[in-house]
Amino acid sequence: MMERIRAHVREHATREGLVASSWPQLSYFRADAPFGPKRSETSGLVLAVIADRAKTIGLPSGGSLRYTPGSYLFVTRETRFTAHIPHATKKRPYLSLTLQLDPEVVLETLLAIDEDEDPAGDDQDAFVDALDDELAATLVRILEAVDDPAARRVVAPLALRELVFRLLRTERAGPMRRAARTDDPRIREAMRLVRARPAEPVSVEALARRVAMSPSHFAHRFREIARMTPMRFVKNIRLAEARLLMVRDGCGAAEAALAVGYASASHFTRDFKAHYGAPPAAYARELRARLTH
């Protein structure tokens, strides 16, 4: 399974840096030379798997995590970190993939697990664990589905839900399962409101009023349940919608930015590049070219 993962990433990570896939949740990263330490951040829940070489990340707590092929990194919340790739060459580059996990899918899965035992372990920003056979097989199904349009629509989302289920069954994810026991339907309603109207002007205070909560309590509960701040969730939804408008509908960057609620095109470009690794217009051109082949 690891060789199939490596072959897939090698085929798709055709240039240095962050490389988009035809499926918005999946991206690749390639480095042809040592990298960092460099400051970075995740925009929520993330699974990262190395196909070749190794990487070390430094956490806000002061600790560090090293992962290699055969292991995975699971980032459990929006967080900042430093990334360091000590070894990479053009002949043997560093290769990895990243899956962005939808907090609503994670929450639904957590609620469905509904186990009686008290999940053990301290809450943490991220952890590294072995990529066992079941996780690897599920990941391979996702990777093999993304290159086929029909499978990308049907198989990939189902396999991603299975992957989330398997991740949340590990002992290391116990604190996240424990947090789900305090589920709040009002937070899920706020998520639905943002998805339904991504361009609508919004603030923490406005969202809190819509679901009858105080702003401070709403912000705390949202971060606890969604594993990211409310405004990070809003930004992620807007950027994903803008990506769809550009790639699927052929909208220009300025038009897409306006359609999803950005008042400033430069602000949109900055956020889009930080999230997807390329300026909006260049990203859309590359992805449209890939989807037509």
Image (spheres, rainbow, N blue to C red):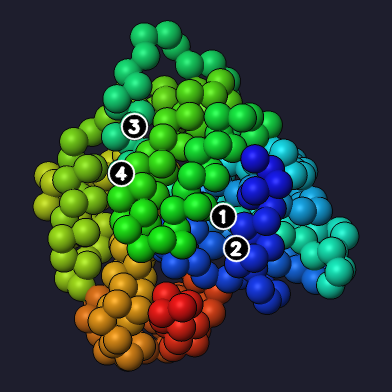
As helix, strand or loop, the secondary structure at mark 4 comes to helix
Q: Disc 2 designates what residue? A: 28
Real-space Cα distance between discs 3 and 1?
20 Å
Determine which of the numbered discs, if any, sits on residue 98 in the image: 1
Residue at left offset 36%, top offset 63%: 149
For marks 4 and 3, give the CA distance.
Answer: 8 Å
Q: Earlier in the sequence, mark 4 or mark 2?
A: 2
**Would you place residue 192 above or below residue 24 in this image?**
above
Asked if labels 3 and 4 touch by Cβ distance under 8 angstroms, the answer is no
What residue is disc 3 on? 109
Q: Position of residue 210 (x, y in %)?
A: 12, 52
Residue at 26% across / 57% down in the picture? 204
Disc number placed over residue 290 in the picture, else none: none
Q: Residue 165 lies in what quarter of the image?
A: top left
Which numbered disc flags the more N-terminal residue, 1 or 4?
A: 1
Task: Judge the density around disc 4: few (<14), some (14-19), many (≥20) Cα neighbours within 10 Å.
Answer: some
Residue matched to label 4: 104
| Among the two numbered marks 4 and 3 on one chain, the one whose residue lies closer to the N terminus | 4
Residue type (three-letter) at the residue carrying disc 4:
Glu
Q: Point out residue 94 in the picture as x, y percentages from the top left corner.
A: 77, 61
Circle 1: is it few (<14), some (14-19), or many (20+) Cα within 10 Å? some
Disc 1 element? strand
Q: Measuring 87% from the left and 60% from the top, which residue is drawn there?
A: 87
State if disc 1 and disc 3 touch (CB < 8 Å).
no
Image height of 6 relative to 292, above or below: above
CA distance for labels 2 and 1: 6 Å
